[in-house]
Image (cartoon, rainbow, N blue to C red):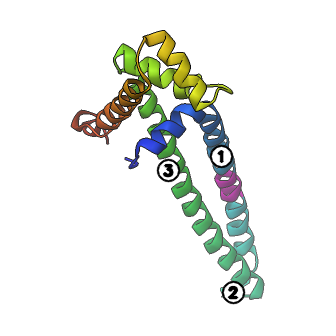
Amino acid sequence: MKKIDEHYICKALTEHETWIIQIQKKICHMYEFTTASEKVQADAIQAATYHTAGGKPDDLTDVLIRYQEILRQQIKDAAICIRELVEELESIYRIIACYNLLDTTGYRVLEVMYWSKGQSSYLQCLLALEKELNLSETSIKRKRKAALQKILELYNSSFVQALQP
């Protein structure tokens, strides 16, 4: 499970849609790369068997064998990259799930400040929340901090970790 902090939570809440799309595109690209590499590797294996005379490999066979090794390593690296991207995606979804479990006030504060912020500045968000919730700026900042801490607590909870494979 990815280690996160409050800054990461804020960024995930603000940019979740963009992040998810980018990560999904990267995963698809890496998957396409691995399947194409496996096809090339199969062709290289077949070609290597055709270029051996009397059981003695020639120079072309050496090149193809090295190429196969490189392809195998690239496929392993791509699989590692895909796993890291899936973990990143899982973290974003987990943060969103934890965000949805917040109390009404904490949810609303984070919603205005991050989730549906749009082009509003931090100060505009604070002013809107002051009017809507009838709270002072300091109280809103405390509610924001408490909501972020609650997400962090839920994200790192033993229940969530128990669900890990």
Residue 30 location in percent, x, y? 65, 51
| Among the 4 quarters of the image, the one containing residue 154 | top left
Quick check: can you spot residue 100? no
Look at mark 3 in the image and give the residue it sits on: 83
Look at mark 2 in the image and give the residue it sits on: 57
Prevailing secondary structure class for the magenta stretch in the rendered image: helix
Q: Is residue 88 or residue 148 the one in the foreground? A: 148
Q: Residue flagged by tag 2: what amino acid is it?
A: Pro
| Inter-mark Cα distance, 1 to 2 | 39 Å
Circle nearer the N terminus (1, 3): 1
Q: Name the front one of labels 1 and 2.
A: 1
Q: Residues within 10 Å of mark 1 (few under 14, many from 20)?
A: some
Q: Residue flagged by tag 1: what amino acid is it?
A: Lys
Q: Where is 130 relative to 157, above or below?
A: above
Q: Residue at x 77, y 82 (%)?
A: 60
CB within 8 Å, label 2 to label 3? no
Circle nearer the N terminus (2, 3): 2
Residue 100 is covered by the magenta coloring: no
Residue 37 numbered tag: none
Q: Residue at x 47, y 44 (%)?
A: 7
Residue 26 numbered tag: 1
Q: Left or right of 89: which side holds 40?
A: right
Residue found at the far left of this picture: 158
Q: Residue at x 66, y 79 (%)?
A: 66
Label 1 secondary element: helix
Residue 114 location in percent, x, y? 54, 29
Q: Residue at x 74, y 88 (%)?
A: 58
> Which segment is the magenta one?
33-39
Residue 157 location in percent, x, y? 25, 37
Q: Where is 47 relative to 28, above or below?
A: below
